Image: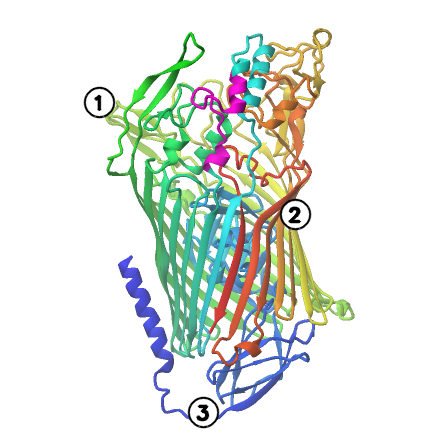
Amino acid sequence: MTKTKTLYLVLVAISLMLPFSGKAQEVNILNDITAAITNRSGDKLSGVLVSATKAKNTAVSNIDGTFTVQAQDKDVLIITSLGYEKMVVYVKQGRLENETIVLKEWGVINPEENINIALRSLPFERITGSVERITGDELSDFPTRSVHEALAGRLSGVSTSYGSTETVTENFGNNIRNQGGLQIYVDGIPTGEIVLTPSEVDDVIIAKDYGSSFMYGTLGATGGIIVNSKHGAPAGQSLKFKSRSGVRTSGFLPSLMNAQDYATNYNIALTNDGFSPIYSENDINDYKTGANPIKNPNNDYYKDFVNGIANYNHITGDFSGGSETVQYFSHLGYYGTDGIESVGAGRSVSRLRLNNNVQIKFSDAGNVNIGIGGSFTKRKVPTLTSDALFSTMSSYPANALPYKINDSIYGRTSEYGTNLLARLDDNAPVTEDSRRDAFARIGLDLNLDDLTEGLSFKSLVGMYTFNVISKTRNYSVNMAQPVFTLNNDGSYTTTYRNYSSGNTSATWGKAGDRVDRTQFINANLHYDRDFSEDHKVIADLVYSNQKLTGNNLNQSTIFRNIGLTVNYLFKNKYVLEGKVLNSPIRQLSQDERSKINYDGGAAWLMHKEDFLSHATWLNFLKLRGNFGVQSRPVSQFFISENLYGGSGGGTFGTRNQNSGAGGANRIFTGSSLVSPKQEYLSLGADFQMFNSKVNGQINYFNIRNYDQVVVPTNLYALIPTSYVELENYGDSRLRGMDGSISYKSKVGEVSYRLGINATYSLSYDTESNSVIYPEAEAQRNSMGNNGGRILGLQAVGIFQNEAEIAAAAPQLFGEVKPGDIRYSDYNRDGFIDERDYHEIGNSSRVFYGVNYFMSYKDWSFSIHGNGELGGSYVENLNWSPGTNNYTNSLSQSWPVTNSLPRLTTLDNTNNYRNSSFWLKNAGYFNFRSVMVSFALPDTFLKNVGIEELKFSASGKNLFIISSNNDDRFMPNRSAGYTQAPVLKAFELGMEVTF
């Protein structure tokens, strides 16, 4: 890390010095530069900040959109306005090339804009696949430190989920079109567990299909997220500080019974099962009054342990600028937070983030791009994870155990062995770890026009590392199980069982380290030539090599790609594109590794056709489609193994079986396996209408994955050995649609934009390594049926008495009593068993996002949300409670109401299984974020050396609209029960630019 910091300081120093070299003797004359500022719709934009970077003067456009600023003969104007992308305009010989400057609004299509896609770039109008783009400034109105989270609900086809909801390890995952396995590329670097903040990001490109992700090879089969960091401007310097501080609290906590209610209802459950109650009236009264807290505790776990508020601070500083030969951008960020625990030292994490980019133009024909940075994270947590904490609190009844028997002994029982106070207070065992991720890259761009017109070369070399160093201090306390003996006078004598002595002098010990490394090289020979107005060609010969090593890998993984792509534009209206790529899988045979993947695409720029020339409402319309076949990556396996004799053991084989005998080399079936493949058909349209006010796209996709490498456990009736050969088997399909549309307008000084996006997907298997049921039970098969199905029984109510049970078809899931769920005989065979399982519902197949942004003068307001439409889920929250805690809803169990079956202490296999009785509507809408900001007018700042000063207030995960009136964060329905809850956040922020 010392080397990283040193290089960081050197780069910043060089960046500071180079722009000023040789400038001391220059004498510059100032000129009045006047122009008008509009958007693509022609609206005149007021309040736009214009900075002449060399003259160090600023101006703000008036209500007519015009401005006048004093600038040098050769100057650079930086133009910024909320809701628009930053624009750089050059002053030459004291004047502008155009007297009207058109700013690009967020989310507005620019057909000629070059978009970074897999290992190359293309003008948007020539891309034959589906891509969507969002800027880092847009993502900055989401109160988060993570770009992954900020993407939630923002773009079609992209879904966002929590990986961990713990405050100090909170992380998120994205996937495209429900495929999973998504690769993220940051400035060309394939990365893993990197945490990116929106303030360091220029834009994010979502490459959804082969039209934009194919050249990434096997890793591009599921699409890609391409992140481009910010870069410096070609003049002047800019320094921006942003500070956000806030508090977080649990968005949802379960409603669980107190000790007296639990004891009362547990007695009812025992009676239902034919047993005698175990809690006396005196016990229940002691729970109410707290008269005997050691023998009859009444713990409120949530109040006692997680009644706290997590404070957090997120501070960033961005320094950028440069000259015509050197541009630089440097990002330094700090993030710190603690946990919501209200006892002990709690949890804490602090993180330092660096991201530095320098572009150096060494001649008219070439430049060098250098990037270096990473993160350093320090974390201290109890060894009891937040997930384990909440799982314990939701499962332990309030009377499970006393926290402490006396001042020196903590309580436990044989059934409830986790004492939360002992695991969280100041003498609790703790873990500290340091996490470091770092990257370094250098790129070379050469213009080879002198060799061949339109020829250029780009290359990128570098590495990414992720290291974890952990240590644990296993403090322990005195613990025992209290035993109470009733005395003649009605009092109790307390003795101890299973006593263990604690250790509060434990020293630190190594807890396990992790090292992951990625080494990569990319090269692109690019050819861009307009042979005439009717014939234009862009071709790319690409090479990439990525090597992964690390503790989590059994063997090094190498992804190597070499391919060619040609894009042809005819008459500026018709696009044809072809790609070929070799992307070998190293575990397979040489013949397989030499095979070629392919993709072809076409696009039609319909808005340029003569028959649409009178459609003035239509600004842009592109119809596109592409189809290709690509290899898929496989999970790690070896094509041979060595078996060793002796007393030791080892892990061998394709299924990681243990063996301690042998002495031979066994060859598996790697030579007979073929590459797993994916066919991808994508059709779609991009459109812009009504003077750029409406922008959007709509897509259809049909994906087939076949020749999948599997362990064929269900294909054979008898498998005589645990060493099972791998086979190519499996054929699955995924089809669906996604799309987005936005409408923006300006009324007076109010500008607003509303965007909606949605994705529908449906999967099914035509060949599957799954159990195959007889024809009479075909509805239970995976093959031939849609994915996401919920199989279960059809419930027809609850048995009210023995007479109803006797008159009904027998239910063969164990003893049936009044208060149990009654099912229908689906297959009409006279009794009810698992052969009556059928489709009773399906998971949601539509997810969507809604985004709104509005600005008025110096004020802005945004709101973002996402959700799912339709579908169902099985609510198993109250299944098999046994001796676990009861939710308050269980007080409504039969016979009080028919909303829940009878209480039981047993594992009731009749009731606790998939059925329509437990089916709930899965639809919901999460209000993910709300932000209000205010920028001080320029008139207040002009004389104090501040370019912009902005204040903001925001909230995150504020509330949920659910068809079940359920306030759990969706779809993380276990959050708060067996998982740490999703947290609400309230934040205040300040941003200042010099």
Q: Which residue position is annotated with label 1?
A: 647
Tell me if I can see residue 278 in this picture.
yes
The residue depicted at 44 percent of the width and 40 percent of the height is 342
Residue 108: image x %, image y %?
63, 65
Quadrant showing the N terminus: bottom left
Give the amino acid type for the residue marked by disc 1 in the picture: Ser
Q: Residue furthest right?
A: 614
Residue type at the position of mark 2: Met
Q: Is residue 528 above or below residue 837?
A: below
Answer with mark 1 or mark 3, whichever residue precedes in sequence. 3
Q: Identify whether 573 is placed above or below 487.
A: below
Q: Is residue 752 left or right of residue 340?
A: right
Residue 684: x, y in percent?
Answer: 65, 54
Say whether disc 1 or disc 2 marks the residue closer to the N-terminus. Answer: 1
Q: Locate residue 271 relative to residue 374 in the image: left or right.
A: right
Residue that numbered label 3 is attached to: 28
Q: What is the count of numbered marks?
A: 3
Q: Residue at x 45, y 24 (%)?
A: 293
Q: Amino acid at mark 3?
A: Asn
User: Dot 2: few (<14), some (14–19), or many (≥20) neighbours within 10 Å?
Assistant: many
Disc 3 is placed on an element classified as: loop
What residue is disc 2 on? 737
Query: Residues under labels 1 and 3: Cα distance?
Result: 85 Å
Q: Is residue 479 above or below residue 213?
A: above
**Magenta-tinted stretch:** 283-305
Quadrant in which residue 419 is drawn = top left
- Of 850 and 46, nearer the camera is 46
